Amino acid sequence: MLSGLHHVGHVTTEYDRTIRFYRDALDGTVGETTTVGGAVNVAFVEWSSFRVEVVARDERGTYLDGLLDELLDVSPYHLAVIVPDIEEAIASLANAGYPMFDDQPVEGLGPYVRAFVEPDSTPGLPIELVELAETDTP
């Protein structure tokens, strides 16, 4: 079902400091950045074989509030794994007893669709399923 790791997610309250650490101390390159509703900042920091998604909520009031609340109840980190068919992966996990936070794919914060497994239902880190758009590369 999995074909690779898309990114490691890091939810933080220190967006700029976290970006500087990954970029300056660990020699990462800041790639795509975006802001959701003027309240949530997102940046992908990249290396040759992986990337970290830095997410910081400055204020509440976006569609991400519920997800960020649940993620932070479990861990400030998550694993985003690549799946070839997200709808099939959603069904497979649900059938295996792992409820989905997103029971349908939603637009990701990059060129992909995504769906989170209910954060408190998995052992270990929360899992985000990612189906890549043709323009995205792992």
Image (tube, helix red, strand yellow):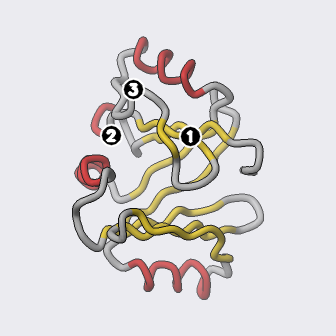
Which of the 4 quarters of the picture holds residue 32? bottom right
Please identify, in this view, whether the residue under mark 3 or under mark 2 is nearer the observer: 3
Structural distance between the alpha carbons of marks 3 and 2: 13 Å
Secondary structure category for the residue under label 3: loop
Q: Which mark is residue 113?
A: 1
Structural distance between the alpha carbons of marks 1 and 3: 12 Å
Q: Where is residue 101 in the image (x, y as percent from the top left)?
A: 34, 34
Is the Cβ of the residue at disc 3 closer than 8 Å to that at disc 2?
Answer: no
> Which residue, given by chain and number where applicable, does mark 3 sit on?
103
> Which residue, given by chain and number where applicable, does mark 2 sit on?
119
Label 2 vs 1, first from the N-terminus: 1
Amino acid type at image mark 1: Val
Reply above or below: 96 against 120. above
Q: Where is residue 122 in the image (x, y as percent from the top left)?
A: 36, 33
Structural distance between the alpha carbons of marks 2 and 1: 18 Å
Q: Is residue 94 left or right of residue 53?
A: left
Amino acid type at image mark 3: Asp
Reply above or below: 103 against 137. above
Task: Determine the residue positioned at 59% across, 54% down.
Answer: 110
Task: Determine the residue positioned at 41% across, 45% down.
Answer: 125
Q: Nearer the viewer, residue 62 or 128?
A: 62
Task: Determine the residue positioned at 49% across, 32% down.
Answer: 105
Q: List the single residue furthest toward the front.
A: 37
